[in-house]
Amino acid sequence: MKTTIRVNRKSPESLTKQITDRLTDLINSGVLAVGQFLPSERELANSAKVARNVVRGSYENLIRAGKVQSEGRKGRTVRAAGGKKKAGAAKGTKAGTKARKK
């Protein structure tokens, strides 16, 4: 990803939200194309001069919003609009696991 993400440390908005919003804008505008890998947590944290957990939180927000999907150890990719979750995944459970009975 060639676009630099900058954060405003004086903003009342959290750093995580700022990065999430900027990545969302890049995805929605097509700068980040479907299937394109996002930078690693470490790369983005270093370039934005923030802690890795800030970037991890942003990536988790994007996954929950359905904008990004995790490819395991390969990284995270931009997801197609209206993309489907993995088969067998119920809300609050991991793919292929059964929900516990109460």
Image (cartoon, helix red, strand yellow):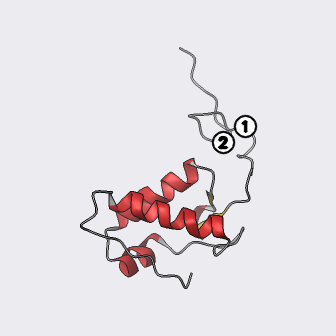
Q: Mark 2 points at which residue?
A: 95
User: Quick check: 5 left or right of 86?
Assistant: left
Identify the residue at horizontal 47%, vertical 60% (top origin).
20
- What's the mark number on residue 88? 1
> To which quarter of the image does residue 78 belong?
bottom right
Q: Kindly check if marks 1 and 2 are in contact, taking CB atoms under 8 A apart as contact.
A: yes
Report how far apart the C-alphas of labels 1 and 2 lie in the structure. Answer: 5 Å
Is residue 54 placed above or below 38 in the rendered structure?
above
Using a 10 Å C-alpha cutoff, classify the residue at mark 1 as few (fewer than 14 neighbours), some (14 to 19) or many (20 or more): few
User: Quick check: 39 left or right of 27?
Assistant: left
Q: Which amino acid does label 2 sit on?
A: Ala
Q: How many labels does the image show?
A: 2
Is residue 77 placed above or below 5 in the rendered structure?
above
> To which quarter of the image does residue 101 belong?
top right
Is residue 22 placed above or below 14 in the rendered structure?
below
User: Quick check: 6 left or right of 20?
Assistant: left
> To which quarter of the image does residue 32 belong?
bottom right
Q: What residue type is labelled 1?
A: Gly
Identify the residue at horizontal 53%, vertical 14% (top origin).
102
Does dot 2 land on a helix, a strand or a loop? loop
Provide residue 17's location: percent of width, then percent of height.
40, 57
